[in-house]
Amino acid sequence: MEAYLAASEWIDFDHPRVKERADALAQGSTGIGDTVRRCFEFVRDEIRHSWDYRQNPVTCRASDVLAHGTGYCYAKSHLLAALLRANGIPAGLCYQRLAVGTEGPPFCLHGLNAVWLPEHGWYRIDARGNKEGVDARFTPPVERLAFPVLAREERDLPEIWAEPLGVIVAALTGHATVEDVAAHLPDIDLLPRP
């Protein structure tokens, strides 16, 4: 579990502002589940999704997401992982491959989190931000993610990563505006289904 509790370049919970926010969210908590819910709802509801609000700058590092109050789903997942890890709760990064439009192509990755809950094991949560047609919630053991996997080429990727994928970091650090990121959303090649 050490990797899912570690600070890093992108999940920098050792940054004073991230640590301060994590401490504030945990204050008065009734337990791990309550702390996870508070951190999840803060990122989901208080950090704006960059594309929904067309809000710059493009962020990647958890401390930058917090400082600017905005991030794509990937960046928001970095902040949520940082807040959870700062509170000693193992957290990782997960991805879905989803159609950009109704059924695709094109496809892109969508970023979310997995958190270790002692009574349930790994549990996925999606702090992307709710809007019409998106209603993600913290309701363990039932997952309430932002998007279902529907089209044939869409996937719930099973891995739980301790660090963001390189294509995610490249997309967020290699483009200057939210529009540039939207024009170059990250994707990966998948093995065909049997």
Image (cartoon, helix red, strand yellow):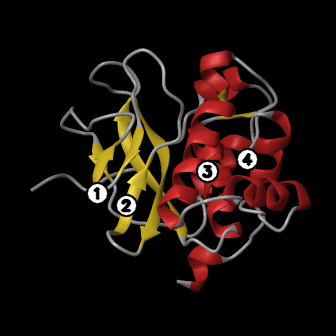
Label 3 secondary element: helix
Give the x, y percent position of residue 160. Answer: 44, 66
**Badge 4: residue crowd in 10 Å (few <14, some 14–19, many ≥20):** many
Residue pushed farthest bottom?
Answer: 2
Label 4 secondary element: loop
Q: Residue at x 75, y 41 (%)?
A: 174
Residue type highlighted by circle 4:
Cys
Pointer 2 or 3: first along the chain? 3
State how far apart marks 1 and 4 are (Cα): 29 Å
Q: Residue at x 42, y 14 (%)?
A: 132
Give the x, y percent position of residue 71. Answer: 69, 36
Instruction: Please identify, in this view, whether the residue under mark 2 or under mark 1 is nearer the observer.
Output: 1
Pointer 2 or 1: first along the chain? 2
Image quadrant where residue 119 sits: bottom left
Instruction: Please identify, in this view, whether the residue under mark 2 or under mark 4 is nearer the observer.
Output: 2
State how far apart marks 2 and 3 are (Cα): 14 Å
Are circles 4 and 3 on residues that touch, CB within 8 Å? no
Image quadrant where residue 182 sits: top right
Are circles 2 and 3 on residues that touch, CB within 8 Å? no
Q: Which residue is mark 4?
A: 60
Q: Which residue is mark 3?
A: 39
State how far apart marks 1 and 3 are (Cα): 17 Å
Residue type highlighted by circle 3:
Cys
Residue type highlighted by circle 2:
Tyr
Pointer 4 or 3: first along the chain? 3
Q: Residue at x 32, y 69 (%)?
A: 120
Q: Which residue is mark 1?
A: 141
Instruction: Please identify, in this view, whether the residue under mark 1 or under mark 4 is nearer the observer.
Output: 1
Q: Which residue is mark 2?
A: 123
